[in-house]
Image (cartoon, rainbow, N blue to C red):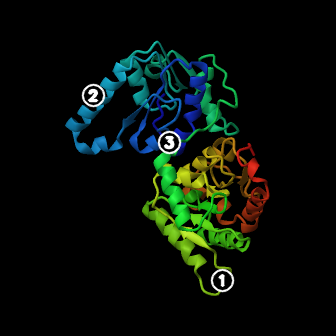
Amino acid sequence: MIKLRHHGDVLLAAPVLSTLRQFAPQCEIDALVYADTAPMLAGHPALAELHLIDRAWKRQGPLRQALAEARLLSCLTARRYDLVIHLSVHTRGAWLVRLLRPRWSVAPRYRPGFWENSFTHLYPAQSHPDRPTVDTNLDSLRALGLEPSRDEARVILVPGAAAEAKMAALLAAHGLSAGGFIHLHPTSRWLFKCWPAERVAALSRELAARGWPLVFTAAPEERERAMMAQILDELGRPGVSPTPTFFDFSGRFSLKELAALTAKARLFVGVDSAPMHIAAAMGTPTVAIFGPSGEREWGPWQVTQRIVTSTAHACRPCGRAGCNDSKISECLTTLPVAQVLAACDELLALPVAARSAAG
């Protein structure tokens, strides 16, 4: 399986691995992804080998890049694949199929000529906005005559023993218990997907008033850390109460550690981002705030959930980088705190046993 995309995209391709294993338990299944997205699949029980492309190769000069590419091709050739499933329209997939010469190969229908002639099977390239991305990925198997069941099509992420042990120690050190805190990851690399900092802070105060300790996380990227600083400044403003019990772990965790942490939360609150998909994969009840991106296509998969969107903006989901590509999404800047809080209250009121049920 080839998936050369971002973290969330790679994680949502994981059900292809599980489903293949169900249909062909005797086969070895490999995946090829970018090195930075490897934690999304590393340790997956259906995976035999994980091959990586490091985007840094391009910065190492033509000779080193060529050597790295040659080593990768040698490793892939040695595996003698019977089937290659390519889950994007990245041109590298077509070239690899021609070089590896598997018996069967499948990819999205993209363009006539070189692309379509590279594969033995094709499936529709453009997902419908009303179809989940996981289901669209599974079209690659339907093109081969395989029909996945819903139980097989689970998103699996394995944090690993080291990440789980580290998070258990961290929670104990801060007096936090499993199921006894709310995890908020309000940032994204795409800030036009984010709910405003002052509204995140207002929601946090309301959740704190209900007695919940709060754990904040964010990526180490500069803009995300800046947004987290705004949220924490709002929480610390004098004269505003209540003051939440919160812990800021922004920029401190690997993706595996983030998964181990969110697996212990009673509730996850976030936006359309990889951490939201990680929370869903770990079975944590999820409140997902959506702006310009489509919740039917990118919403949490097979987990107890509430999707919160603006009811006042018929233009969404527009798929744009903010209103008129301004990087500011009015459907998010005007989204009421009360609407998100109501979604949180609904999930917090559910019995813990319902945490892994589909919402």
Residue at label 1? 240
Residue most extreme to the bottom? 239
Residue 301: x and y in percent read 66, 42
Disc 3 marks a residue whose amino acid type is Met
Disc 1 marks a residue whose amino acid type is Val
Residue at the spot 46% in from the left edge and 61% down from the top edge = 251
In space, the residues marked 2 and 1 are separated at their CA atoms by: 60 Å
Number of the front mark, 3 or 2? 3
Q: Nearer the viewer, residue 273 or 19?
A: 19
Q: Earlier in the sequence, mark 2 or mark 1?
A: 2
Quarter of the view holding residue 289 = bottom right
Residue 87 in sight in this render? yes
Q: Earlier in the sequence, mark 3 or mark 1?
A: 3
Q: Is residue 198 above or below residue 59?
A: below
Within 10 Å of disc 3 (Cα), the crowding (few <14, some 14-19, many 20+) is many
Residue at label 3? 40
Residue 297: x and y in percent read 65, 41
* Helix, strand or loop for disc 3: helix
Disc 3 + disc 2, Cβ < 8 Å: no
Residue at label 2? 70
